[in-house]
Image (tube, helix red, strand yellow):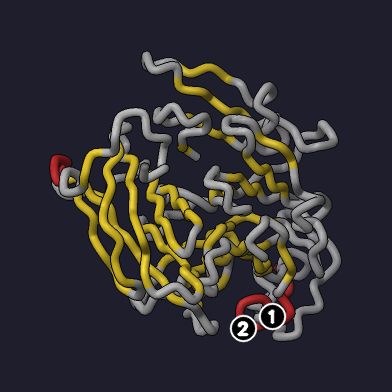
């Protein structure tokens, strides 16, 4: 996972290693990187233990403008949430965030932090599938595959709602269309497939068909922003940071489609706005480190922002501050 971990506007690299310490390679601005995961708090979990890392979700779990990291693990372990703060430092908040207090556990692979109901808080989704046989999951909707070979490998997916402060509640039992069938799930891709303002989900499964899940949840207002660089042939600006000001607070999305596990996602920045029907201001930190500001716009639309069409941020303005 690539992202600016310390606010210097240069991309760093997080590598979640299966059964080994994580690596956080900090960009030295000269084409070289220094491994600093241990000193920055993300090499081990809070018990000083390494786990079987699989999928990575990047998002702002507690709404402080800094990205946090969720890594999925085995069913005999717990998925781990590292919250960033202060900038460039990470702390394991798995217990405090209630991520470990799930109704059931699975071996997680694909995962995302995405606002599913557009209330302004990024929810958590994990798709599960075993790597060795354990007790058969008594799924209420049965199994995805009738072949008994997969007995013990098939597990159910999970959905957690976020209260906006980084505390999650397992809502899996309320979403049985997504969580009620046991399968050997691996990839989870997210994106607004029908452009209706709701984040949809696509799940790949071993020995079973791909499943597409349309978002039919009651939702608040929303805004989706595509950021492109005309100088690069109009391509999506991977690595950009997009911040909006709405209803007295700020939200930030990191444009990086390569989240989850072996998946590419919708590169557009999707924001849930709750009851707000307008965004007051927008700022974009482009991959080259330059920041531009854009005027506020009405909610419930998809808008493309082009590099060079905004106002250059004043010198010395904090990253994403819009000031």
Where's the C terminus, which quadrant? top left
Residue at 60%, 49% (x, y): give it: 55
Q: Where is residue 64 shown, x and y percent of the image? A: 58, 48
Give the x, y percent position of residue 105.
79, 62
Position of 161 relative to 132 (above/below): below
Q: Is residue 251 visible?
A: yes
- Give residue 138's quadrant in the image: bottom right
Residue identifier under label 1: 180
Residue 44 higher or lower than 281, as above or below: above
Say the numbered circle drawn on residue 147. Answer: none
Q: Is residue 109 above or below residue 224?
A: above
Direction from residue 268 to residue 55 in the image, left or right: right
Q: Secondary structure at mark 2?
A: helix
Q: Residue at x 67, y 65 (%)?
A: 163
Q: Nearer the viewer, residue 228 or 152?
A: 228
Residue 149 in sight here:
no
In the rendering, at what x and y percent does residue 305 appear? 23, 55
- In contact (CB < 8 Å): disc 2 and disc 1: yes
Q: Is 138 left or right of 312, judged from the image as shown?
A: right
Read off the residue under disc 2.
177
Give the image location of residue 206, x and y in percent.
58, 64
């Amino acid at each position: 996972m690539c992202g600016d971990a310390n606010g210097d506007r240069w991309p760093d690299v997080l590598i979640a290693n299966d059964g080994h310490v994580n690596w956080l390679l900090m960009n030295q601005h000269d084409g070289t990187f220094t491994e600093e995961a241990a000193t920055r708090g993300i090499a081990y979990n809070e018990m000083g233990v390494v786990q079987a890392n699989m999928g990575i979700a990047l998002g702002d779990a507690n709404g402080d403008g800094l990205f946090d990291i969720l890594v999925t693990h085995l069913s005999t372990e717990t998925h781990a949430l590292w919250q960033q703060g202060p900038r460039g430092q990470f702390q394991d908040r798995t217990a405090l965030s209630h991520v470990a207090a799930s109704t059931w556990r699975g071996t997680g692979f694909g995962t995302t932090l995405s606002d599913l109901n557009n209330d302004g808080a990024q929810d958590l989704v994990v798709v599960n599938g075993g790597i060795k046989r354990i007790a058969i999951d008594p799924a209420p909707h049965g199994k995805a595959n009738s072949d008994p070979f997969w007995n013990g490998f098939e597990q159910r997916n999970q959905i957690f709602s976020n209260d906006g402060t980084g505390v999650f509640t397992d809502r899996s039992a309320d979403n049985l269309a997504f969580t009620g069938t046991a399968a050997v799930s691996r990839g989870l891709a997210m994106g607004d497939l029908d452009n209706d303002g709701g984040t949809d989900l696509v799940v790949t499964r071993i020995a079973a068909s791909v499943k597409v899940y349309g978002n039919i949840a009651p939702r608040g207002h929303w805004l989706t922003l595509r950021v492109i660089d005309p100088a690069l042939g109009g391509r999506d600006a991977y690595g950009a940071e997009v911040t909006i000001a709405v209803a007295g607070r700020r939200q930030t999305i990191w444009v990086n489609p390569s989240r989850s596990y072996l998946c590419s996602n919708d590169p557009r920045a999707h924001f849930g706005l709750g009851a707000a029907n307008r965004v007051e201001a927008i700022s974009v930190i482009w991959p080259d480190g330059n920041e531009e500001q854009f005027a506020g716009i009405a909610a419930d639309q998809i808008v493309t922002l082009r590099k060079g069409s905004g106002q250059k941020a004043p010198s010395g303005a904090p990253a994403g501050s819009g000031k």
